[in-house]
Image (cartoon, rainbow, N blue to C red):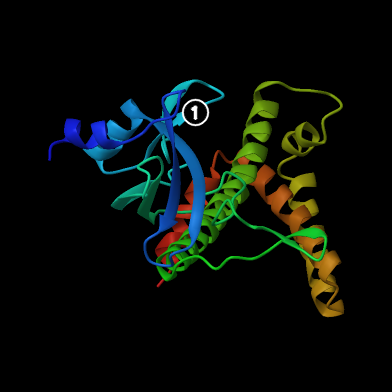
């Protein structure tokens, strides 16, 4: 039986639609209810992934085109009256736009409606764990990038003060006395760090080290040494 013959056996309603129940092939959990017209069903058969008809937008849409939560079709079952379909899929990610594994997560019980937790398939659990691990790694890399960027931003301000003197600028005052005031301030801040370390005062250590770093950046700027030069040296020391 070819595709045209199959479609001729299906009973679409007066609006040209047929309801579709989507079920996870592995867990047998019902994931969602949607609708297809003849064209979207044809595309589903051709491409092997679910394509639905949006009644509100009046257009076709492939599941996962935006979210990435694609449904690969594994089996299509027609009901006894040929007027509804059950499609078993391999669900990538979650099925519901709310972020839930299934759209059916509200249970009516005891005169109340409450949300229930549905366990996704083992493959999805693994996928979610790997995604979370990847996001954590990406977050650390992004934070590291932000941390290094603030050093560069401060250094750029220092370089700007060298070219554009401002009488009320503390950086300009330090740069103008790079052989007297600046070394003295670095010595003072280093001493403050030592005191904070001896006191084991975490907040004070953070504050004083930030002061020391800032004045050291001004010293680097006065000598035209960039933070990248220091990063390069540190990388060479790493074993």
- Which quarter of the rendered picture does the C terminus lie within? bottom left
What residue does disc 1 label?
Answer: 54
Instruction: Using the image as rendered, state which of residue 138 and residue 44 is in the foreground.
Output: 44
- Residue under the image location 79 percent in, 23 percent down: 166
Rate crowding at label 1 as few (under 14), some (14 to 19) or many (20 or more) other CA atoms within 10 Å: some
- Which quarter of the rendered picture does the N terminus lie within? top left
Residue 74, image quadrant: bottom left
Is there any visible trace of residue 66 in the rendered image? no
Where does residue 144 sit, x and y in percent of width and height?
A: 57, 54
Q: Residue furthest left?
A: 1
Query: How many numbered discs sit on the rendered protein?
Result: 1
Where does residue 96 sit, x and y in percent of width and height?
A: 55, 48
In this view, 224 is above or below 107 = above
Q: Residue furthest front?
A: 81
Does 210 sit left or right of 168 as displayed?
left
Where does residue 102 sit, x and y in percent of width and height?
A: 55, 55
Residue 205, image quadrant: bottom right
Judging from the image, what secondary structure is the residue with disc 1 in? strand
Instruction: Using the image as rendered, state which of residue 141 and residue 134 is in the foreground.
Output: 134
- Residue under the image location 84 percent in, 24 percent down: 167
Instruction: Using the image as rendered, state which of residue 111 and residue 51 is in the foreground.
Output: 111
Is there any visible trace of residue 103 in the rendered image? yes
Does 42 sit left or right of 24 as displayed?
left
Where does residue 99 sit, x and y in percent of width and height?
A: 59, 50
- Residue under the image location 66 percent in, 46 percent down: 217
- Residue under the image location 68 percent in, 32 percent down: 157
């Amino acid at each position: 039986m070819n595709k045209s013959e199959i479609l001729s056996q299906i009973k679409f309603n007066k609006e040209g639609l047929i309801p579709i129940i989507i079920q996870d092939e592995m867990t047998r959990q019902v994931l969602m209810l949607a609708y297809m017209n003849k064209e979207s069903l044809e595309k589903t058969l051709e491409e092997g992934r679910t394509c639905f008809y949006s009644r509100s937008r009046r257009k076709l849409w492939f599941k996962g085109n935006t979210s990435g939560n694609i449904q690969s079709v594994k089996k299509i079952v027609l009901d006894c009256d040929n007027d509804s379909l059950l499609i078993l899929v391999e669900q990538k990610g979650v099925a519901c736009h709310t972020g839930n594994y299934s759209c059916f997560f509200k249970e009516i019980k005891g005169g109340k409606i409450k949300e229930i937790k549905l366990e996704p398939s083992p493959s999805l659990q693994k996928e979610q764990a790997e995604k979370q691990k990847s996001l954590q790694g990406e977050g650390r890399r992004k934070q590291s990038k932000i941390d290094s960027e603030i050093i560069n931003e401060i250094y750029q301000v220092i370089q700007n003060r060298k070219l554009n003197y401002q009488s009320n600028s503390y950086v300009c005052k330090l740069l103008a006395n790079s052989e007297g005031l600046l070394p003295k301030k670095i010595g003072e801040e280093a001493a403050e760090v030592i005191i904070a370390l001896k006191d084991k005062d975490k907040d004070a250590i953070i504050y004083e080290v930030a002061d020391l770093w800032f004045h050291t950046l001004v010293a680097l700027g006065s000598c035209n040494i960039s933070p990248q030069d220091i990063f390069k040296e540190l990388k060479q020391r790493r074993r």
